Amino acid sequence: MRGKIIVTGANGFTGKYLMRELAEYGFQAVGIWHHSMPEHGGEFEWHRIDLTDGDACERLVDRVKPDAIIHLAAQNSVPAAKQNPGETLRNNVLAAVNILEACRKSTGDIRCMLAGSAAVYDMSACSHKITEDMPVLPRNTYALTKYFQEQMAQRYRADYGMDILCTRPFNYSGYCQGENCFLPNLCRQVSRIAGGRQEPKLNLGNLQVSRDFLDVRDVACAYRLLLDEDVPSGIYNISSDSSVKLIDIADYLCHKAGIEIEIHTDESLLRKDDVPYICGSAEKIKAATNWKADHSVFDTVNWIYESMQEEMV
């Protein structure tokens, strides 16, 4: 497929990398935004749409006539979802349904890709790689909305024969991600220490857990490859196929900075139900697209940290 692709949430963290990825490979990327105006709007075609307005979604699809839609837009904060579940349901479920309805009513044959989350899985007692057929057990409102989105996609596939893919990405990171996430937070603290702006002590949570980390550039590549018309509809993990202890990442960055840094456990950052080991299986997406993660978590850390260092020059 080399066609016109609508990307919702195109001005968000993932969307910015995905728009560039699509353009680099010859797609015509059309970005959708609502609250935050694109900084470099002239590079792409942009439309401002409230995705919770079904009529607006239908008008958008009729006007653009896309070959595919990648739906990234969502309320992704777990704390915000807990604080305001109704608004999160509107943003994460109603918006997805409106996208699906607009495609169903369109005269074109549109491939829909709904960005979900690996948070839907029951990870509480998992000691091996998580495959797409593992049980789901959303443990927070955000994860529940992503599961609802998948269930609606399943209904649209079954009832209308629509071409819909749902993704379940594991943790991923990159430069310009919000610093409430582990890797950017770690890199920012070490950057401040290296620049003499913070005492040589890292304040972090539980570093004995192991996590599956991806690079946002690899995630953007996965979305692009999933657009291929030969890839079957269904659910796809996007994972690195490996898991790394957080303490090993922190130790690596401290060594890279060349500074003696104390690592302090902040009790306020500890979670009672922290899962000791999370690792996703990427076998299904590899078989369907030949995709694999090209960047290790240490590559991502280097990228984020060195970019932050350049900011401070």
Image: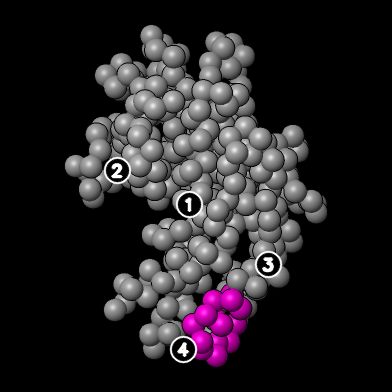
Please report whichever mark, 3 or 1, sits nearer to the chain's N-terminal start: 1
Q: As shown in the figure, which amino acid type bears the numbered disc 2? A: His
Of 311 and 12, the residue lying toward us: 311
Kindly identify which residue carries mark 4.
199
Alpha-carbon neighbours of circle 3 within 10 Å: few (<14), some, or many (≥20)? some
For badge 1, the amino acid type reads: Val
Residue 222: horizontal and vertical position, in percent?
Answer: 52, 41
Q: Amino acid at mark 4?
A: Glu
Please tell me whether mark 4 or mark 1 is closer to you in this view.
1
Residues in magenta, as a range: 250-263
Asked which quadrant contains residue 295, the reply is: bottom right
Q: CA distance from mark 4 to mark 1?
A: 30 Å
Relative to 71, say whether 101 is above or below.
Answer: above
Mark 2, residue position: 35
Q: Which residue is mark 3?
A: 245
The picture quadrant where one finds residue 102 is top left
Indicate which label's residue lies in the foreground, 3 or 2: 3
Q: Amino acid at mark 3?
A: Lys
Query: Quick one: quadrant of the N terminus?
Result: top left
Give x and y (percent) for residue 201: 53, 85
Q: Secondary structure at mark 4?
A: loop
Does the magenta-highlighted stretch encompass residue 155? no
Provide the secondary structure element on which disc 2 rests.
loop
